[in-house]
Image (tube, rainbow, N blue to C red):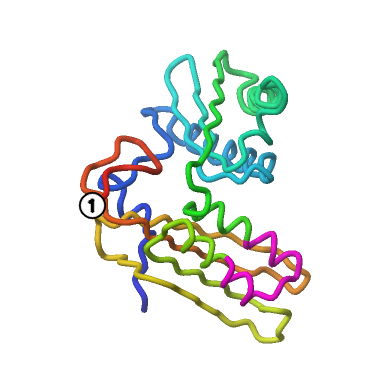
């Protein structure tokens, strides 16, 4: 049997910090469920913006949501009207009963082609448009290599190109040191829904080694 560990969770505290920051004893299950629903809601609405990460911070009277996206202009709109509308939607959907102020910060991802969630979303869009999966894999790897990634691995599984028997295909370039805790490896997995069924996709991106702990950041740090 394989004993697989989530590459990002494995490095919490050394390379990565938590995406959700709050402390609660009595309301822990409620806050956890709410965080998951908020992230699913934002990913659905802001899909075209290319979401790299969603960070949530809470205190007694305020919830701060930070969106790291590839195309912030899609959300912000003219004069920030789009961002304000999105903030009101989140407030109405999740915090109508609570007297809590919601803040929404939108930040641009410095290198979208080194973000596993953004690369994976592009792959999902192409596979759902019935593009050949091998071309999709090669294009994703080429994007990461051009952006300066030291290693990349992509994996797809399911009824590829409509085949009757499901199978798994992998393609990689460079190195992916999964057992090195200093290695900054961005990982994400999701599903493409096609007329033949679900296609599972996973992306690993190796950015280099980090020698100083990151305080609550999803990206960055000092590299050798």
In the orientation shown, which residue stands out farthest toward the front? 146
Residue 144 placement, left or right of 42: left
**Quarter in which the N terminus is drawn:** bottom left
Q: Residue at x 54, y 79 (%)?
A: 169
Q: Taking 61 as reference, is 94 above or below it?
A: below
136 falls in the magenta region: yes
Tell me which residue sits at (36%, 42%) in the image: 220
Q: Is disc 1 placed on a helix, strand or loop? A: loop
- Against 141, residue 20 (above or below) is above
In the image, is residue 196 part of the stretch drawn in magenta?
no
Name the residue at the right extreme. Answer: 195
Q: Position of residue 119 (x, y in %)?
A: 56, 57
Across the whole image, how many numbered discs are drawn on residues? 1
Residue 17, how many percent across, how many down? Answer: 34, 41
Provide residue 120's location: percent of width, then percent of height: 57, 59
- In the drawing, does residue 16 fall left or right of residue 95? left
Residue at 75%, 70% in the rendered image: 130
Q: Main secondary structure of the magenta part?
A: helix
Of the pair 191 and 178, the residue shown nearer to us: 178
Q: Residue at x 66, y 78 (%)?
A: 160
Which residue position is annotated with label 1?
224
Q: Which residues are magenta?
A: 123-139
* Observer-nearest of 13 and 210: 210
Q: Where on the picture, by quarter, is residue 166?
A: bottom right
* Foreground of the two, 179 or 34: 179
Classify mark 1: residues with Cα within 10 Å, few (<14), some (14-19) or many (20+).
Answer: few
Residue 163 vs 35, above or below: the answer is below
Q: Position of residue 182 (x, y in %)?
A: 24, 55
């Amino acid at each position: 049997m394989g004993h697989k560990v989530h590459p990002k969770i494995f490095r919490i505290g050394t390379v990565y910090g938590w995406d959700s920051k709050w402390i609660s004893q009595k309301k822990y299950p409620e806050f956890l469920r709410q965080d998951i629903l908020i992230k699913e809601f934002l990913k659905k609405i802001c899909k075209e913006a290319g979401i790299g990460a969603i960070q949530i911070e809470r205190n007694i009277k305020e919830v701060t949501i930070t969106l790291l996206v590839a195309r912030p202009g899609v959300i912000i709109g003219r004069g920030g009207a789009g961002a304000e509308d999105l903030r009101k939607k989140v407030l109405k959907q999740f915090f109508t009963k609570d007297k809590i102020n919601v803040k929404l910060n939108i930040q641009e991802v410095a290198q979208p082609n080194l973000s596993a969630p953004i690369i994976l979303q592009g792959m999902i869009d192409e596979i759902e448009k019935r593009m050949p999966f091998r071309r999709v894999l090669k294009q994703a790897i080429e994007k990461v290599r051009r952006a300066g990634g030291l290693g990349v691995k992509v994996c797809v599984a399911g009824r590829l190109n409509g085949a009757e028997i499901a199978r798994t295909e992998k393609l990689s370039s460079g190195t992916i040191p999964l057992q090195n805790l200093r290695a900054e490896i961005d990982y994400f997995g999701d599903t493409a829904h096609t007329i033949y069924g679900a296609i599972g996709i996973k992306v690993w991106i190796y950015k280099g080694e980090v020698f100083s702990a990151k305080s609550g950041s999803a990206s960055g740090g000092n590299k050798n």
